[in-house]
Amino acid sequence: MKNRGQTSIEIMMIVIILLGLLLATAYIMVQKSNDINRISVIQRDTQKCDNIASKITRLSSNTGYGKEIVTGLENEVRIEKGSVIVGNISCSYKGYVWLGEDDAQNGFWLLKNKTYSVKKIGEKVEFEEVVE
């Protein structure tokens, strides 16, 4: 009878250890998944930021007429003097940028899920929302 109680305690300890290992494994898997998602968002925002900044710089330095399209914005984008900000990512550009009456000196927002045409008018690069 004494051995039977000892066996029950040993089985309970094994079950507790196995549950602990299962919980630790699940926690590690969730953390790794969160890390992968975070890296994916950073890569997407960096790519979008670089894309917009390069379009502004390309149009600013181009002496001829040019036009580009900015689409597929998953986040709102902030355009400020000399920088484009997407999420927590910031990219630099060279040029004078406007959205309607707002200039980049004061900053303006490009709204998510909108399409914008970007064209050079004189010495400035102007964003204009495309109405579909």
Image: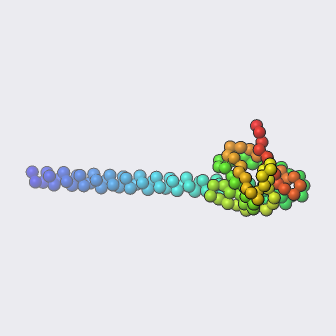
Q: Can you give x and y, in whole percent of width and height, for residue 54 in the image?
A: 76, 58
Q: Give me the residue at 57% from left, 56% from top.
A: 39
Residue 50 point in image, percent of width and height: 71, 57
Q: Quadrant of residue 43?
A: bottom right
Number of marks present in the image shown: 0
**Residue that extends furthest to the left in the rendered view of this protein:** 1
Q: How is the image coloured?
A: rainbow
Please give left or right for residue 26 compared with residue 129 in the image: left
Relative to 45, is 26 on the left or the right?
left
Residue 98 seen in the current view: yes
Q: Is residue 47 visible?
A: no
Residue in front for this viewpoint, 27 or 129: 129
How far across and how far down the image is residue 34, in percent?
51, 53
Question: For the point 83% across and 58% down, which residue is it?
Answer: 60
Give the residue displayed 76% in from the left and 37% down from the top.
Answer: 132
Q: Residue 130 vs residue 31: left or right?
A: right
- Residue located 46% across and 52% down the image: 30
What is the quadrant of residue 130 in the picture?
A: top right
**Residue 80 relative to residue 87: left or right:** right
**Residue 37 horizontal/vertical position (percent):** 55, 52
